[in-house]
């Protein structure tokens, strides 16, 4: 196959990109998206501040632009993200515990119902653990007011809202075996043991010289898969250029393919010029949509 999506499909996987509604009017952007990718994640448009800017008042227009485009092209859609401390409107942070619980469950239910049956995987909770060696939960309105149980509650609410969506926990700096990924692992193991609904773990995989592709990446994906969940690479980008960057991308793809429950890979943008990383060239296409060596490495690894 000669596109990322088609090559991944031959391996039973999807190959996705984060998409921004701002760029859907740009012909080359859309042509590259449509040609290469089989799954789409809204880069910002399905976050809480975008969908429910004030309590109970939903605006799906930007998210639907991306969703409708993807569906018109036969692409799958990943949902990102329901419960996250960031890009969270102020009104949520100001609620007391009881109202916050109601608002969280209502947000999950309304958003998932809007796309019911149409989203292959949802990031139900994003980035709930601290960096570093503590293995502790990150401070957030949800954690601070509702306690550890907020994650379980969010997943139970999500299962009821759309039983066909795979429900994922998603985080960064969990790509290798370390204290943070151990903490997520312990949570997932506990959820599986107690029957809390969870189907997948997302590994954001934002790599740079300070945070390179870990040597135990595949082993880490595998230990999660062995708990009985799918794993997905959800926000891949790798700062660098040339053959070194290409080699890293190839290693990431091979790690996923070596784990039978690694069901797909999403890169966090299409051309370098639209990367969320302010500097650098972390993606597969240059600013003119030419394929980079990293692209060739991904395609040949698939
Ligand atoms: C980023 C977007 O790419 C930016 O456009 C936005 O300004 C901030 O969020 N982890 C996540 C993603 O889960 O939602 C983030 O996306 C990148 C880090």
Image: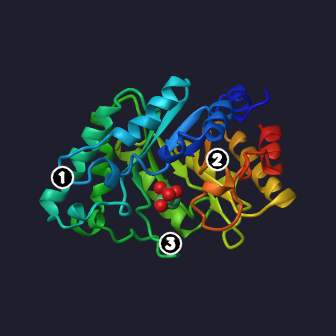
Q: Name the residue under label 3.
A: 131
Where does label 2 land, which residue?
270
Q: Which of marks 1 and 2 is nearer the N terminus?
A: 1
Disc 1, disc 3: CB below 8 Å? no
What element does badge 3 sit on? loop
Q: Name the residue at 52% across, 66% down.
A: 180
Residue 226 is at least partly visible in this image? no
Which numbered dot is residue 92? none
Towards the viewer: 230 or 223: 230
Q: Which is more toward the observer, 72 or 7?
A: 72
**Relative height, residue 59 to residue 95 (above, below):** above
- Asked if residue 152 lies left or right of residue 187, the reply is left
Q: Whole-percent x and y of residue 259?
A: 67, 41
- Identify the residue at horizontal 34%, vertical 44% (top origin): 196
- Please report contact status of discs 3 and 2: CB closer than 8 Å, yes or no: no
Q: Residue under circle 1? A: 55
Residue 102 percent across, percent down from the top left: 16, 51
Q: Quadrant of the C terminus?
A: top right
């Amino acid at each position: 196959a000669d596109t990322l999506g088609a090559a991944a499909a031959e391996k039973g996987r999807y190959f996705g990109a984060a998409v921004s509604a701002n760029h859907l009017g740009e012909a080359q952007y859309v042509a590259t998206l449509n040609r290469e990718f089989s799954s789409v994640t809204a880069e910002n448009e399905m976050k809480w501040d975008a969908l429910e800017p004030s309590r109970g008042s939903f605006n799906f227009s930007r998210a639907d632009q991306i969703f409708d485009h993807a569906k018109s092209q036969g692409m799958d859609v990943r949902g990102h993200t329901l419960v996250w401390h960031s890009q969270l409107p102020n009104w949520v942070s100001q609620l007391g515990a009881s109202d916050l619980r109601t608002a969280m469950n209502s947000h999950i239910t309304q958003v998932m119902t809007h796309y019911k049956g149409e989203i292959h995987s949802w990031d139900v909770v994003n980035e709930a653990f601290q960096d570093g060696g503590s293995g502790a939960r990150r401070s957030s309105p949800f954690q601070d007011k509702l306690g550890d149980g907020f994650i379980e509650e969010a997943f139970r609410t999500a299962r009821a809202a759309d039983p066909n969506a795979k429900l994922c926990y998603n985080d960064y700096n969990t790509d290798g075996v370390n204290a943070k990924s151990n903490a997520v692992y312990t949570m997932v193991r506990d959820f599986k043991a107690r029957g809390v609904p969870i189907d997948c773990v997302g590994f954001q995989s934002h790599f740079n010289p300070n945070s390179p592709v870990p040597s135990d990446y595949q082993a880490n994906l595998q230990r999660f898969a062995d708990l009985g969940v799918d794993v997905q690479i959800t926000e891949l980008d790798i700062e660098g250029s040339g053959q070194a960057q290409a080699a890293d991308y190839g290693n990431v793809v091979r790690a996923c393919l070596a784990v039978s429950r690694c069901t797909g890979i999403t890169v966090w943008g299409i051309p370098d010029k639209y990367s969320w990383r302010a500097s650098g060239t972390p993606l597969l296409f240059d600013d003119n949509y030419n394929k980079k060596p990293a692209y060739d490495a991904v395609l040949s690894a698939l």
